[in-house]
Image (tube, rainbow, N blue to C red):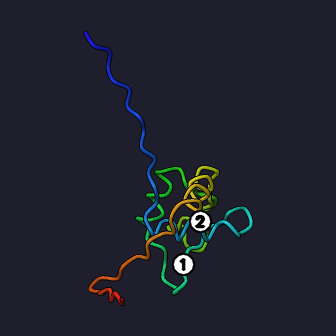
Amino acid sequence: MKPAAKREEIPVAPTASQRAWLERGLDEPGGKLPLFDLAGQRISPRTVKSCIEHGWAEPWFTNPMKPEWLVCKLTQTGRAVLNRLSHAAPPRPAKAKGARILVLH
């Protein structure tokens, strides 16, 4: 009988929106991640939960005014992923629904 082949884990990279959120924690004290994006919209709970599940962010403390909002901070794993990505290609911008890209030659 053949021994089972070893599976190598393929590192997962954050999506453009996850990466944008995580990068904002790089320059904040303690790696605090924002509750709102640069347009003033609340960060999607799906983005927050996914980053926590991947170990890139972790809950920091409960917001007494809005206990349903997760106040998170960047983890060492999150910093390492961002560091690895900063040496790779720049992130692709998130495309808005219905947006068209015009390519000029």
Q: Position of residue 81 (x, y in %)?
A: 56, 54
Disc 1 element: loop
Residue at horizontal 59 percent and vertical 65 percent from the top: 71
The number of callouts visible is: 2
Quarter of the rendering occupied by the C terminus: bottom left
User: Which of the 4 quarters of the picture holds residue 30?
Assistant: bottom right
Residue that numbered label 2 is attached to: 71
Q: Position of residue 10 (x, y in %)?
A: 42, 44
Of residue 22 and residue 70, the one placed in the foreground of this image is 22
The tag on residue 22 is none
For marks 1 and 2 on the same chain, the one whose residue lies earlier in the sequence = 1
Residue that numbered label 1 is attached to: 36
- How far apart marks 1 and 2 lie (CA) works out to 11 Å
Label 2: few (<14), some (14–19) or many (≥20) C-alpha neighbours in 10 Å:
some
The kind of residue tagged 1 is Phe
Of residue 8 and residue 40, the one placed in the foreground of this image is 8
For residue 18, side relative to residue 33 (left or right): left
Q: Position of residue 97 (x, y in %)?
A: 29, 82
Quarter of the rendering occupied by the N terminus: top left
Looking at the image, residue 103 lies above or below residue 30: below
Disc 2 element: strand
The kind of residue tagged 2 is Val
Of residue 104 and residue 5, the one placed in the foreground of this image is 104
Of residue 29 and residue 13, the one placed in the foreground of this image is 13
Residue at horizontal 49 percent and vertical 58 percent from the top: 51
For discs 1 and 2, the disc positioned in front in the rendered view: 1
Residue at horizontal 58 percent and vertical 57 percent from the top: 59
